[in-house]
Amino acid sequence: MTEEFQQPRTYESAAGRIEAIIKRLDSGEAGLRETLDLVREGRELVDYCATELEAVGQGLEELRLDELVARLEHGT
């Protein structure tokens, strides 16, 4: 992560910031330096979101495995 960019506290806040970045870039009002900074920040946010989603997916997979084991143990 860059020094200017602070890691978001939640997936939702990161997703909201990505939306704001996209709106700013789509407006065509950002200069060259700002565009570069926004793209870098957006990339970091996308990486953060991907990591969060992967962790949640892993947690869901573990829950499904636990549920399967419990069903097998109870014969259902």
Image (tube, rainbow, N blue to C red):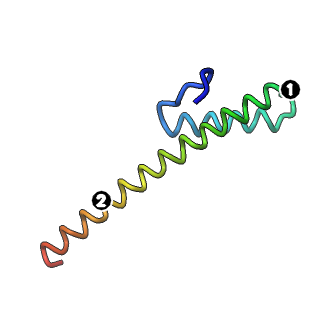
Q: Amino acid at mark 2?
A: Leu
User: In the image, is 74 to the left or to the right of 21?
Assistant: left
Q: Which mark is residue 31?
A: 1
Front-lying residue, 29 or 48? 48
Q: Which residue reaches farthest bottom? A: 75
Describe the element under mark 2 as helix, strand or loop: helix
Q: Disc 1 residue type? A: Gly
Disc on res. 61: none
Give the side of residue 65 with respect to residue 18, left or right. left
| Dot 2 and dot 1 residues touching (CB under 8 Å) | no
65 is higher (above) or lower (below) than 29: below
| Residue found at x 24% / y 63% | 66
Q: Looking at the picture, how far across and down is residue 47, in whole percent?
A: 57, 43
- Residue at 71%, 34% (x, y): give it: 21
Give whichever of discs 2 and 1 has the lower sequence position.
1
In the rendered image, the quadrant that contains the N terminus is top right
Give residue 49's position: percent from left, percent from top. Answer: 54, 43
Nearest to the observer: residue 23 or residue 44: 44
Residue 17 appears at what percent x and percent y?
A: 63, 33
Measured as percent of width and height from the top left, residue 72 is found at 18, 75
Q: Secondary structure at mark 1?
A: loop
Up/down of 66 relative to 38, above or below: below
Disc 2 marks which residue?
A: 63
